[in-house]
Amino acid sequence: MTKLLSGKAVSARIKEEMKEQVKALKENGIYPGLAVILVGDDPASKVYVRNKKLACEYIGINSFEHLLPDTTTQEELVKLIDKLNKDASVSGILCQLPLPEHIDEDAVINAIDPKKDVDAFHPVNVGKIMTGNYDFVPCTPAGVMELIKESGIDVAGKECVIVGRSNIVGKPMAMLLLHSNGTVTICHSKTRSLADKTRNADILIAAVGIPEFIKGDMVKPGAVVIDVGINRIAPKVLVGDVEFDAAQNVAAAITPVPGGVGPMTIAMLMKNTLKAAQINKTKNKAE
Ligand code: NAD
């Protein structure tokens, strides 16, 4: 029978463990705190920011929200980041992407202190992911790795095929699988004979951003299928990048959307924030 890899259940378990870890840190005078910056009022971004705040509150992490108007200049944003870099009560800083067009994303990412870069987007942290000697693992790929572990599959020697090569998902995903000794193929919009590649995958990861792009006949029987995609096709309807009903008839294990990779991403963000709190020895604001 096909195993459903429930990120909702796994992330709930991880969050319970983290509650205990936060308690222990506080007993040692370390107070994890996450600063989240949102520029503008993109509805999807607002939902992500709210969920991150709720997760912080649940685990016992201080959460500092900075909701800025979309007229905010790049200079103002970088100034705020600079202030947060120096704030001893802030362990981690996250600037929700995408940013309004007049702001250069790279300039903003580069402004975050790499030791507080809980998204692991700063070039210093990207480089560390390449070498395998990293403090922060990018949240979505880290969540995917946890789910693969959960499926009982050992990545070593497996054919891993990733569809999508973004800096946020596809590329770091490839590195993490490689560090686990997978044989990795990265596919993208210019890849030829895509279905031949995906049908070869023991572990297939879809991060394309096109609703139900991966069809059932593109999946190898017995594969582990991880669907990173989140596509809103109607006001209250979310679907992934994989045609779930068809793929689940073929796969050995598969993630649902919603309730798969999404909740894992937030759990991994919390994990990175705890790590940052330890690295930066974060103090409580009240002190
Ligand atoms: P992106 O738009 O930056 O990248 C999409 C990738 O898909 C590109 O590399 C492109 O080459 C590839 N692609 C596009 N068309 C293709 C085609 N016809 N054939 C093969 N490859 C093709 O997107 P992203 O930021 O990597 O996000 C991908 C999806 O994952 C989106 O649905 C996004 O919402 C979702 N996402 C989910 C989470 C989560 O927490 N679950 C986190 C980040 C992104």
Image: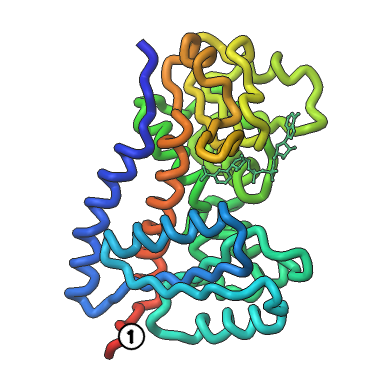
Q: Residue furthest front?
A: 235
Whether residue 104 is visible here, answered yes or no, is yes
Q: Position of residue 240 (x, y in %)?
A: 56, 31
Residue at figure coordinates x 50%, y 29% from the top left = 226
* Crowd band around label 1 with a 10 angstrom C-alpha radius: few (<14), some (14–19), many (20+): few
- Quadrant of ligand 1 in image: top right
Q: Position of residue 148 (x, y in %)?
A: 42, 32
Q: Position of residue 180 (x, y in %)?
A: 48, 37
Q: Is residue 216 above or below residue 224?
A: above
**Picture quadrant of residue 170:** top right
Residue at figure coordinates x 38%, y 37% from the top left = 7
Residue at figure coordinates x 35%, y 59% from the top left = 54
Residue 250 or residue 102, whichever sits in front: 102
**Picture quadrant of residue 78:** bottom right
Q: Is residue 85 above or below residue 49?
A: below
Whether residue 184 is visible here, answered yes or no, is no
Instruction: Read off the residue under disc 1.
Output: 285
- In the rendered structure, the answer to whether residue 190 lies left or right of residue 218 reads right
**Picture quadrant of residue 279:** bottom left
- Element type where label 1 sits in the image: loop
Residue at figure coordinates x 62%, y 16% from the top left = 215
Q: Quadrant of the C terminus?
A: bottom left
- In the rendered structure, the answer to whether residue 132 lies left or right of residue 167 reads left
Q: Amino acid at mark 1?
A: Lys
